[in-house]
Image (cartoon, rainbow, N blue to C red):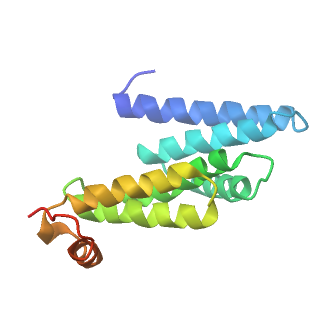
Amino acid sequence: MGGTALEVDRARQLEIAVQALAFQSRYAEHPRTNEAKRLEALALLEAASVGNRTLDARRSQLVSGLRAESALPSLQRCEIVARFKSLDVERLPWTARTERLTGYTTIARSLIEEFPNVSVCYESLLSLAEALRCAPDAQRPIEVRYAAAFSGRPQDS
């Protein structure tokens, strides 16, 4: 397997997805079939994050199915949905720090609505709020500046 590290990673993720799909096909009634679907989804999400968009339809189908799969623990379903929603934010340039943080904040809020019993969603939202609060004032979204002005906490300049 030659090529750049990125190409190797893409190929490795697709190989994992293919193996997970083969397991599902061969052992459709196996108790770990949902775990194989989860691994396939995570591999396809990782492949997409490093630039491989060839299996977008399959990835979307898996995420939709796993999102509704009550046999999977909420934390695992939340992980898949969060990763899926993060793909668009990851494509923003690194120089767009505030936009990225705002995008992740929107994702965290939507995850709290969908998975209210998953504590990591709340922890993420708190971390993102702190990161936004610490951003230079000119880069803060207006609602963050407004909230900071009335929170009683000292503001950074």
Figure quadrant of residue 97: bottom left
Relative vertical location of residue 80 with respect to residue 135 in this rendering, above or below: above
Relative vertical location of residue 94 with respect to residue 3 in this rendering, above or below: below
Figure quadrant of residue 143: bottom left
Q: Nearer the viewer, residue 128 or 69?
A: 128
Residue 10: x and y in percent read 47, 36
Residue 130: x and y in percent read 29, 56
Which residue occupies the extreme front position in the image? 152
User: Residue at image x 57%, y 44%?
Assistant: 44
Is residue 149 in view from this perspective?
yes
Which residue occupies the extreme top position in the image? 1
Left or right: residue 113 versus residue 24 is left
Left or right: residue 71 versus residue 6 is right
Relative vertical location of residue 22 with respect to residue 130 in this rendering, above or below: above
Q: Nearer the viewer, residue 74 or 7?
A: 74
Q: Nearer the viewer, residue 74 or 146?
A: 146
User: Residue at image x 51%, y 54%?
Assistant: 121
